[in-house]
Amino acid sequence: MADPKEGSIVVIGSGLIGRSWAMVFASGGFTVRLYDIVKEQVTAALEDIRKQMVELKKSGMLRGSLSAEEQISLISGFNDLKLALEGAIFVQECVPENLELKLKIFADLDSYINDSAIISSSTSCLSPRKMFNGLKHVKNCIVAHPVNPPYYVPLVELVPHPKTDAVTVEKTYSLMKKIGQSPVKLLKETDGFVLNRLQYAVVSEAWRLVQDGVISPRDVDIVMSEGLGMRYAFLGPLETAHLNAEGFKSYCERYGESIERVLATFGPIPTFSGEVAEKIDQAFTEDLTDKPNQLQARREWRDACLSRLAKLKQEMKKN
């Protein structure tokens, strides 16, 4: 367990991402302070975390070396920001993806935080330049973008502001490794970071294939889950190409012309609204009258799959 003298991890926002982050940090043995402006939301979040950890214990999927009870005891709730930040060594912001809201939060954090604490944002797309400019602690600020939900998917994209200190990047990287995440460092900022740029490329082509009547929404997902996704669960696209020939250079020589030909046929960027959006939505909710409960049940199934996959990947790495 982390020494309490090291200070606390503070999670700002008690929604799904905030709850998952709190569980991740607790699994690494850190004391966690979960903050939200509304007391009732914090109370509900703590109860949900307790239920999740009990279920994870029952299924054998609980992360970390501590018991569920020990991990639960490490997480406490706050609705006083200044109090929550006392002795904090790391802050993970998880409020909704709204720049004005985040700017207000960071201004408050900047006024309360000590000079050594790191301020980290979970944003998936907002620029560190826009969020952290003008803060007196800008050298301590960084984006640590997780994949939803971070408890089950370990990737974290680390994106610094131009004035972020190199020590901040290395400390954040080390912390993420310590709690069992898989951090990557972006060498420079790009819109959407890396995960979403790759994800959006796939989503946009999937949309165009449905729009053009090439394939149904459900079948295009099968192409990913039973095809590309099988490989990509363990290998990225570049190493996959590398292994599909006698190295990556050989792959380019063998398939480069075909790839260029196909890419030239890709259509314009979709607007992501209208008839196609309705068609895709209906494909995944047809014959179901209780959409909210169906979505929740499907998310729980997804999380169980991801948890088992994460466990398998850990076992494979040991071999």
Image (cartoon, helix red, strand yellow):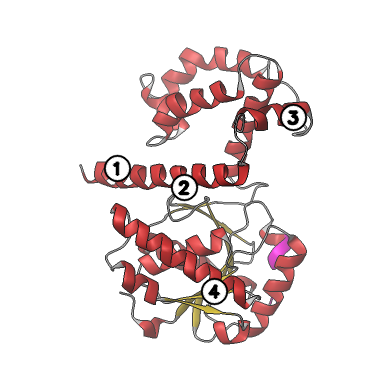
Q: Residues within 10 Å of mark 3 (few under 14, many from 20)?
A: few
The residues bearing labels 1 and 4 have C-alpha atoms spaced at a distance of 34 Å
Closer to us: 237 or 276: 276
Q: Residues within 10 Å of mark 2 (few under 14, many from 20)?
A: few
Q: Residue 111's image quarter?
A: bottom right
Q: Secondary structure at mark 4?
A: helix
Determine contact: label 2, label 3, CB under 8 Å: no
- Image coordinates of residue 10 in percent, x first then y, are 52, 75
Residue annotated with mark 4: 43
- Number of numbered discs present? 4
Upstream in sequence: badge 4 or badge 3: 4
Q: Nearer the viewer, mark 1 or mark 3?
A: 1
Amino acid tagged 4: Thr
Upstream in sequence: badge 2 or badge 3: 3
Residue depicted at 29% across the width and 42% down the height:
312
Residue 5 sits above or below residue 68 on the image: below
- Image coordinates of residue 289 in percent, x first then y, are 62, 37
Amino acid tagged 2: Glu
Residue annotated with mark 1: 312
Residue 10 among magenta residues: no
Residue annotated with mark 2: 300
Residue 134 among magenta residues: yes
The residues bearing labels 1 and 3 have C-alpha atoms spaced at a distance of 37 Å
Residue 131 sits above or below residue 10 on the image: above
Q: Is residue 239 among the parts visible in the rendering?
A: no
